[in-house]
Amino acid sequence: MAASRALFIGRFQPFHNGHLAMARRILQDHSELIIGIGSAQYSHTGENPFTAAERFEMIHRALDAERIHNYHIIPIPDTHVHSVWVGHVLSLVPRFDAVYTNSALVIRLFKERGVRVLSLPMVEREELSGTEVRRRMFSGGAWETLVPAGVAAYIKEIDGVQRIKETYKYSTPYGTRENPEE
Amino acid sequence: MAASRALFIGRFQPFHNGHLAMARRILQDHSELIIGIGSAQYSHTGENPFTAAERFEMIHRALDAERIHNYHIIPIPDTHVHSVWVGHVLSLVPRFDAVYTNSALVIRLFKERGVRVLSLPMVEREELSGTEVRRRMFSGGAWETLVPAGVAAYIKEIDGVQRIKETYKYSTPYGTRENPEE
Amino acid sequence: MAASRALFIGRFQPFHNGHLAMARRILQDHSELIIGIGSAQYSHTGENPFTAAERFEMIHRALDAERIHNYHIIPIPDTHVHSVWVGHVLSLVPRFDAVYTNSALVIRLFKERGVRVLSLPMVEREELSGTEVRRRMFSGGAWETLVPAGVAAYIKEIDGVQRIKETYKYSTPYGTRENPEE
Amino acid sequence: MAASRALFIGRFQPFHNGHLAMARRILQDHSELIIGIGSAQYSHTGENPFTAAERFEMIHRALDAERIHNYHIIPIPDTHVHSVWVGHVLSLVPRFDAVYTNSALVIRLFKERGVRVLSLPMVEREELSGTEVRRRMFSGGAWETLVPAGVAAYIKEIDGVQRIKETYKYSTPYGTRENPEE
Amino acid sequence: MAASRALFIGRFQPFHNGHLAMARRILQDHSELIIGIGSAQYSHTGENPFTAAERFEMIHRALDAERIHNYHIIPIPDTHVHSVWVGHVLSLVPRFDAVYTNSALVIRLFKERGVRVLSLPMVEREELSGTEVRRRMFSGGAWETLVPAGVAAYIKEIDGVQRIKETYKYSTPYGTRENPEE
Amino acid sequence: MAASRALFIGRFQPFHNGHLAMARRILQDHSELIIGIGSAQYSHTGENPFTAAERFEMIHRALDAERIHNYHIIPIPDTHVHSVWVGHVLSLVPRFDAVYTNSALVIRLFKERGVRVLSLPMVEREELSGTEVRRRMFSGGAWETLVPAGVAAYIKEIDGVQRIKETYKYSTPYGTRENPEE
């Protein structure tokens, strides 16, 4: 296998078994994996419960447990201005040969920029979505089986389920779209 | 009562009778009250109709009418990045001994930072929510009885009900989630 | 007709026949038209598919086709802080004599600032809304008849319908309110 | 004396005897004083060593020691965009009748906005400038006599002189214009 | 001459005779001129005294006086993040065939992005720099001969020289590098 | 050696021999090294010529050449608000046991936050500063011997010396403090 570097972009809220399968599959074709943590500045909300640092730790533990070491992790804050998003990514992530993602928008933005993008369909994901994992954590369902063992252990270590229960509905410190505030 | 300072954080859109009862109750245990106006940069939207300056004036009039003078009011702009929010508050608000709030997220963020937080349950709030006050102002209901007299007078002075009728559905100058735009 | 300048503010996502009719009508009363493109920094989302540059090109082609030349186009990024929005507009747009818009909030903000605002009701708009045009583009409906011919041609040139199909549900590169992400 | 409110704007890095004299003088003509703390978001640099919270505490102690109670303190973050600065101030500070400041730019910005501004020359300031106080703190000179006793005590309490010695030359965590970094 | 569009980027603080000569020269080779006003958000400082709106008006009057009508003016706010600057420009300015500028950095950024850039040396500029014009306005020198007559008249109309005298040394409302503040 | 993680913070413009010596020394005491790239969003200026992506590549090549693999690299954008900087770092960097840096301000900020900081004096640096490397690149001096061979090769690969020559004096696309603009 010739040296080649792949970029795998997601939010990893949290890093689950689907992400891990994807990482393994990408490394069949590439000698180095860069994992880009999207929406890196956000945490403590329903959609983004964990900080980039916590997501880094999850990925680190999950890949180490698999004896995968040829990877790097780079936090990528949202710009909210899509026209500069690719330039922003390219300023943070060293040159790569392929991008993997589940986001049609990410593909679109790279294509419009003229960057050649190889892409594989995500591992079949039925239950394997971050949304489902977070929903189960919030409502007391069985979430542990959806994530690598090291990730489950880490989330318990940082009291992550309780955080999700307390912050699931907030987008600002004072309230939410549903307005349980004031 | 030993000298102690309490921080009471909310959005106060508008400052209503529940807020006033809370302020009185806090001052039974503390010698000084700091009122932190959250989402301070926002105004002219459905959730945040009044500027921080207008909310300052409401609180000022309501507390003066109660002959309460041992308070200060500090506007706190949203950071939208929860991981730095406590640091942001601590850079604006002088040292305090307890925090009062209705927000589970605010409590959570202070706890994770290791700041000791005392907290009282909000005065029973049924109708006493800012959401309800704004809803009544928008739909022509009886809102005046939910707020201190000075606040009601001030809102009329600045033509606040009309502002809410005109801006209730907007989050940008051009449209809303419901899209009454273009 | 004495020299006078009108400002017409909208998002123009895309520029449609209602906008064109409005521009023509404004120019019956004014010698110069400034078109302010709102939410200028956004693109590639459901509500804001096109960049300011693309919207500029649409307006340019549509007005040139009508042999209208006494106009200028100025992109106006959102501030998200409504209390400074008028000051922001006045720092970008040269002195004008009247403002035209469909937004009650825009009218409100100018009025509170003490700027005298003349305003005409928008041309009857039933179907003539950007929301409707985008909805049709997304769902495969007949959108071309709702926009000037030059605009329709340009949108095809830049593969705009496909972009809308791929980005309609996204507000960040990783997901949406409906969460088709991860 | 009729009820009237004055706004006194500065950075107060730190609050010194000249500021205190100015506050006293303003209160001869006005029944209420609002002190606006400018550049509120900055701290730990040569020009802005103290946080807004620390500057709040300094002012609070200095005025209480003078038995002055008819004042409020409002932090005002810099916008860096001067064309919206007055609108920004007006969104944070309740209606006032006069502005006091030593800054020709502040006067200019208010005037251009059409706000009537009364202004008094600053108390004779030879040595009474924040720049001079900070310079002395940095170089080991006699700074205590330039500030109210309560301010000097507070600065010692928070180890402020040492902070200034360590941060005087930094504008980012990694270096300065003089570049003692890397 | 085939239809082609040129982009001319500068700050135009103020628009002077060198800029006008450059615009005329560009229009010998291109059928349409887009003038990009850089640092568009800034005003009331020594380097950027005039708002984008005022610079728009200067350029408008200068070109109209020359009977030049095939131009558009687009304000371009600074991003301060150079790696996304070209993407930012391309999101605001419709497709162009050549860029003209005096800035080696602008050339560099476009080249690195892979955009082909044609460029002409600026008209010989000895005295013809904005820096020199502003210096003369500040110090009472003869600046009027360096700018088009319409620009000189407009600057007087808005009391521009007095503004420069009052704001020349400020970068924030409270002080400057030279620190005449507090 | 017990498992422990060290954070080494700098700007690495570029990564030079002093940085490499420091990294080696840190790894004598710690089992894992996190390299935090400060001022991550900046590039193409005199103080920050290289993007975070380019700096990542430099460090990656330099450490791989030394057969060092127990490291991670995390870009850390400047916040410019020092009071939230530590919270910002902690949201990006997974838990660490010691911080290494040459910046007195970084040490100060961590200490005030109550984070225990171990720190070693930087390797003797006479010539080993980024400032000196960039100065030599700009003026045509011998810079290659100051950086690891892989870094020198990479800088040539991306035409880095030429970039520095063209951008050394710029802080915005239009000019510098010395003002070679317009």
Image (cartoon, coloured by chain):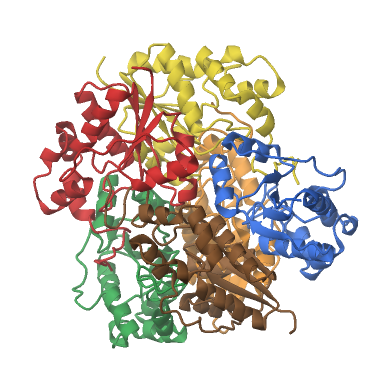
Chain colours: A red, B green, C brown, D orange, E blue, F yellow
Q: Residue drawn at (57%, 84%), measured in percent from left and top?
A: D2
> x, y (%) of residue D62?
51, 59
Relative to residue F118, is residue B76 depicted above or below?
below
Relative to residue A111, is residue E66 depicted above or below?
below
> x, y (%) of residue F176?
70, 41
> x, y (%) of residue D75?
49, 60
Report which quarter residue B114 is drawn in: top left
| Left or right of residue D87: residue F26 | left
Question: Does residue B174 appear in the picture of this structure?
Answer: no
**Closer to the camera, D69 or D110?**
D110
Relative to residue F55, is residue F150 depicted above or below?
above
Q: Residue drawn at (72%, 59%), measured in percent from left and top?
A: E71
Report which quarter residue A101 is drawn in: top left
> x, y (%) of residue E154?
80, 67
Relative to residue B134, is residue D46 depicted above or below?
above
**Closer to the camera, E87 or A77?**
E87
**Quadrant of the snapshot with the C terminus of chain E:** bottom right
**Closer to the camera, C30 or E171?**
C30
Q: Residue drawn at (53%, 43%), measured in percent from left and top?
A: E84
